[in-house]
Image (tube, grey):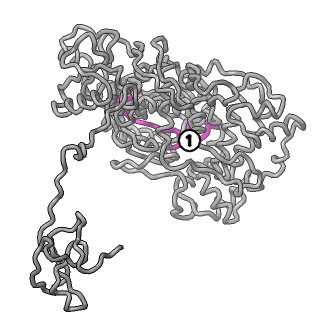
Amino acid sequence: MATRAPGTACLTRKCSPRLLEIRPSNPEVLASPISCCGSPCAPGARGTPRPMLPAGIVKAFPKRKKARDGAEQVPPKMQKEPEAGGPEDWLASVTAYVLPAGMGRARAEIFHKHIVQRGGRVCSQPSPEVTHIIVNEGMDGGRALRLLRLAALPPSVRLVTAAWLSTCISERKLLSTAGYDVLVPGRSLDAPERQTCQKPPLGNGDAQPQARSEALGPEAEAQADTSEQLPAQEAGPPAQRVSEDEGSDGEEPSVTPADLEALILGHYPPTPSEGSAAAPPPVGKWVCAQSSHTKKENHNQCITEKLEVLAKAYSVQGDKWRALGYAKAINALKSYHKPVTSYEEACKIPGIGKRMAEKIQEILASGHLRKLDHISESVPVLEVFSNIWGAGVKTAQMWYQQGFRTLDEIRTKASLTSQQAVGLKHYEDFLERMPRAEAAEIEQRVREAAQALDPGLVCVACGSYRRGKPSCGDVDVLVTHPDGHSHRGIFAKLLNSLRRSGFLTDDLVSQEDGSQKKYLGVCRLPGPGRHHRRLDIIVVPYAEFGCALLYFTGSAHFNRSMRALAKTKGMSLSEHALSTAVVRGPGGTKLAPGFALPTPTERDVFAVLGLPYREPPERDCAGDGGDRRPDPFLHPRPPVTSGCSRPLADPQPIGPAL
């Protein structure tokens, strides 16, 4: 910093009459006035010297802000207004009327604010301009019409729950109203939705038009919902992948959640070489939307049967992700419209990677796959062990690692649970499928015992029997009463009656799952040469009978497709109920269960989901490798808080076999 000569007056504007008391090392300086610029002031300069106390640096006078003239004043910051057609205008096509009944004025005003901020309009009263009437969750259509003083709802107006608007706001885009529509008397749920979705700005190259045509039916709408919502549900932890270093074959190692959804949907997204990425998915490609009577011919059976052997081998070894990768390729080949003839053609099939195409080429060239010659010797042993009822893949691997190689060694040396002991005792009987006529006899015995207790009880055999299969692995019998309450207390009485008659021979599991009571056991019909058969008895309230009948009828692949479709519509489908207004977080985690819709019959479930009704024989989809419905006990969901249950998959050993 430049200094001036002693005695020269300080002429800078920065020099002010403020004096600073300092504590210099030279005491003689104390007598000299010091200006704010740090140099002694000349005689006559503003400010008079005064004695200074060496008390450190302090301000003698408070600092005053410098006044600015009008020209120098900084204007206040203004909020940037969203540009027309920008990302904040995605509700521009919505003119809403919010019915405050049931939700309160405060919540209604919050909705008003959000709609206006995002480009929409709000009407204080129902008017011809209204496109959406938003009502509280739980509001039925008849009451809404009475509150609105309308005889009927105009066809161009959607009556939706507030959950639709909440979901739109949270995802910052205009979503389909499918799954949020309120059923109005005299109006079908299949009524076409008014075209309200806007086309996003074409500023980026990957933007796709989101507008839906009014001509699209519910199946097309479901497909559009899938393409828009599934990626959001897959957010969260990265997909699990199998490292190529973990396997010796270097197969396609990665399986993503999209692959899981592809197996459920029964189709795969087109590759860029097959067409534009903006092309809408084909209509009606959901497995649950198609009849199993119209199964396509497998033009590549010579390939798929060999790949299925490898898929089974990986499955029993616990390598579920590689097994799923094979299942993905097998499904793609079964759905292909003609025989595959070359490596290049296989590479172009969605769901098949380069390494899988190499295996296909090897089969085409030689009729054999060398990898089948190198399947581990543990695979057939693990398959035998995992067929013991109550033993999963991990238990089978544990037994193999302990040195067991035969069922006799398991029977004499392994520690078994009581369920595994029963499964081992009836190993051959459980593996042998029963004729359809025998399943009908078992159903009749359960019905007779139930109606002897209460003639009004309804008993229905489900599973592969209800789907019309010629043979069955087990029998599932649903028990209910149309009055909604007489089923209570019947569970224990029915089981005791069947035990006393000698029909039930072994008990496996008894579980209370909410309002449903389930029994898994073993039965045998009277007479010589009869086999022991697996029997499940499920007592359900009549309000849940429709969803329970749908679930326990199967097939597993059909059920997964139904649940996936319900999920894309903001719903949740289980053996208990079809619920709407379900709130999910990242990764599809359920945050709020919503509320159950009235679905007393299977047809009601199909109608709410916008699907054509499928008779039980039309649901025999075997995309999961079999027609067996997933056992809710061997593959349990998170444990229930009420009642008691004992998991059967890989249970802890509790003692030696008898």
Query: Which residue is at a point 13% across and 74% down the rendered structure image?
Result: 44
Is 33 left or right of 12, judged from the image as shown?
left
Pointer 1: what residue?
257
**Quadrant of the rendering where the N terminus is positioned:** bottom left
Boundaries of the magenta span: 521-546
Residue 636 visible: yes
Give the percent coordinates (x, y) of residue 525: 55, 35
Q: Position of residue 68 (x, y in %)?
A: 19, 50
Q: Nearer the viewer, residue 335 or 450?
A: 335
Q: Residue at x 70, y 41 (%)?
A: 326
Compared to residue 513, the image places residue 459 above or below, namely above
Tell whether 63 sits left or right of 571.
left
Magenta-span inclusion, residue 450:
no
Residue at disc 1, secondary structure:
helix
Of residue 516 and residue 20, the one placed in the foreground of this image is 20
From this view, report whether residue 597 is shown above or below residue 506: above
Give the total of numbered labels: 1
Residue 540: where, in percent of width, then height? 37, 34
Q: Nearer the viewer, residue 537 or 64?
A: 64
- The local crowd at label 1, few if under 14, some if 14 to 19, many if 20 or more residues have their Cα within 10 Å, is some
Instruction: Locate residue 459: give its quadrant.
Output: top left
* Quadrant of the image containing the C terminus: bottom right
Residue 452 in view (yes/no): no
Query: Label 1 is placed on what type of residue?
Result: Pro
Residue depicted at 15% across the width and 75% down the height = 19
